[in-house]
Amino acid sequence: DQQVKQNSPSLSVQEGRISILNCDYTNSMFDYFLWYKKYPAEGPTFLISISSIKDKNEDGRFTVFLNKSAKHLSLHIVPSQPGDSAVYFCAASPTPAGGTSYGKLTFGQGTILTVHP
Amino acid sequence: SQTIHQWPATLVQPVGSPLSLECTVEGTSNPNLYWYRQAAGRGLQLLFYSVGIGQISSEVPQNLSASRPQDRQFILSSKKLLLSDSGFYLCAWKDTSYEQYFGPGTRLTVT
């Protein structure tokens, strides 16, 4: 049972345009959401996160939007750059960060973003 | 600042051979530690997690085991590797926040 889904395996975007990566979840216990970026043969790096008490979080070129009623989040990258080409993973965590959830994250399958010069 | 190390970076092992992958974290105390596997073209699958020395929880029944002999050391092992154990193994740590931070990974190929 895939509790976090990234339905687009890949996305191709022109440099300078907006990249929108989508993620859906089914578990209503998820309360905190994260995006990771991964280059081939490297570990994922944390990009940006959002708590369920917010609907938007922005960090430079990266903005994450959360629609809790639709159980949907998206990552916007504006403007896209060739160096953004990577696999992007969405992840979700139930609250609290510690406690009985032990901080476990549930990851989506990832979306390969290719930004063309 | 905190850093996480994994070794080896790549490993080619025959079927039936043992496995030991090591992960160490610096610059933090009593972190939660995690082992993930990424199979080819797949997402990240949580294998084991640990909230303290000697405390290991398994997420998926499999041919692998984990141990945490020291606060900042996490080891992934197998007595006999299977072909299906091939993949990219990642170690991660977290403190009291939600974010997990990953090591560089180990590419394991079982032949």
Image (cartoon, rainbow, N blue to C red):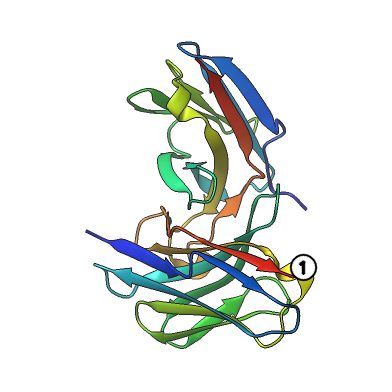
Q: Amino acid at mark 1?
A: Ser
Is the N terminus of chain B in the top left, top right, bottom left or bottom right quadrant? bottom left
Q: Position of residue A38 (x, y in %)?
A: 51, 43
Q: Please, what secondary structure does the residue beneath circle 1 have? A: helix
Quarter of the image where one finds residue A9: top right
Q: Is residue A72 visible?
A: no
Is the C terminus of chain B in the top left, top right, bottom left or bottom right quadrant? bottom right
Q: Position of residue B8 (x, y in %)?
A: 48, 70
Pointer 1: what residue? B84
Residue occupying image coordinates x 55% and y 37%? A88
Relative side of A3 to A106, left or right: right
Q: Position of residue A18 (x, y in %)?
A: 50, 14
Q: Is residue B29 visible?
A: yes
* The one of B102 and A69 positioned closer to us in this rendering: B102
Relative side of B36 to A2, left or right: left
Residue occupying image coordinates x 67% and y 66%? B109
Residue occupying image coordinates x 52% and y 30%? A85
Residue occupying image coordinates x 48% and y 62%? A103
What crowding class fits label 1: few (fewer than 14 Cα within 10 Å), some (14-19), or many (20 or more)?
few
